[in-house]
Structure formats: structure tokens, C-alpha cells
Amino acid sequence: MPMLKIFVGTMYGGALDVAEQVKPLFEEAGYEVAILENPTLDDLDAETTDLALFCVSTTGSGDYPGAFAPFANAIGEKSPGLGWLRYGLIALGDSSYGETFCGAGRQLDELLAGQGAQRLGERLEVDAMETFMADDAALPWVEEWIDAQQLKVA
């Protein structure tokens, strides 16, 4: 059974809630799913990661949540890169912060692309000003993502 790892960067639990809510959709699609709330670079391993989903909140200044920052920094220093990695990305933010809206997710997306990883489909950006519960936007996006990217294996 292929392994999907959901890498979570959260401040107040919103991104973790999204990860927990979408997990059953991936299980129904035939994946073993691991949710990693405090991921390390060792968790992002070609031998044990068939597909990755990143669920990342943004702090007010557009930065990664504290516990996620060392992981993101390690990705930036990774060599020889992540050319084998296929991933999706759900960025959570608040548009009232202007230019830093979904800044962590956008930075992570750029970082992963710079390491050769392949994003499947478009990044989802969830705006707290428009969507009270982030999973209300994430669940239909994940269903569509699984179908559009032909990720179903079961």
C-alpha cells in the first residue's frame, strides 16, 4: 500500500485539523496515511514517502509556525534535492494581513520547487476571512485533487 505523508505546520491547530479531516479521503483512495505534526527531514524520505501533502498555517508576519521552521530550513539545505517528490499543498492564512497572506505556504511551495519536487495541481490557499473552518475548503479540494491527479490506487 503506498504511503501518503501529511506534513503539518500549525500554530493553533487549524492545519492539524485539516490533516485529520482529509486523512480518510486518502485512506479510501488506497493510501496508508501518516500525519506528521513535528516533521523532520528524516520523515521526508524517498523510501517511505510515495506522495506528500503539506498543510501549513502562516503566522501574522508571513512566517512558518515555530515548530515547522526547522523542517523548512532543512529542506532548503537538502542536497541533492527532492526530484523524486510529488506533493500537494494546502496553505492557511488570513488576507487581512495583506502581502503576507499564506506566506508560509507560498514560501514552502517555492522552496520545494527549487529542490526539484513536483507539485501536482494547484496550491489551495484558505483565507480565514472567507472560510471559518478550513476543512470546509480543504475537503472538496482534496476530493478534486485525488480525481484530477488520478491518485486513487485502491
Image: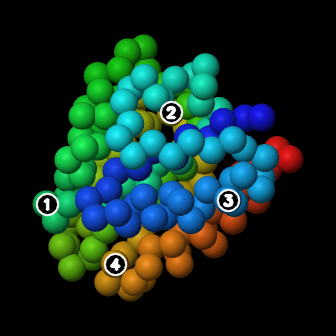
For marks 4 and 3, the one nearer the N-term is 3
Residue 45: percent from left, percent from top? 52, 23
Q: Quadrant of the N terminus?
A: top right
The amino acid on which the numbered mark 3 sits, given as a three-letter code, is: Pro
Residue found farthest to the right: 154
> Could you tell whether 85 is left or right of 116 in the image?
right
Residue 30 vs residue 79, the one in the foreground: 30
Kindly indicate the quadrant of the structure image that contains residue 57: bottom left
Q: Which residue is mark 1?
A: 61
User: Up-down: is 134 above or below 31?
Assistant: below
Circle nearer the viewer, 1 or 2:
1
For marks 1 and 3, the one nearer the N-term is 3
Residue at the image point whose x is 38% and y is 15% from the top: 79
> Could you tell whether 31 is left or right of 8 in the image?
right
- Label at residue 24: 3
Residue 10 vs residue 148, the one in the foreground: 10
Residue at the image point whose x is 31% and y is 68% from the top: 93
Kindly indicate the quadrant of the structure image that contains residue 3: top right
Residue 119: percent from left, percent from top? 54, 44
Coloring basis for residues: rainbow
Mark 2–mark 3 CB contact (< 8 Å): no
For marks 2 and 3, the one nearer the N-term is 3
Residue at the image point whose x is 30% and y is 37% from the top: 72
The amino acid on which the numbered mark 1 sits, given as a three-letter code, is: Ser
Residue found farthest to the top: 80
Q: CA distance from mark 4 to mark 3?
A: 23 Å
Circle nearer the viewer, 4 or 3:
3
Residue at the image point whose x is 82% and y is 44% from the top: 153
Q: Which residue is mark 2?
A: 117
Q: Which residue is mark 4?
A: 128
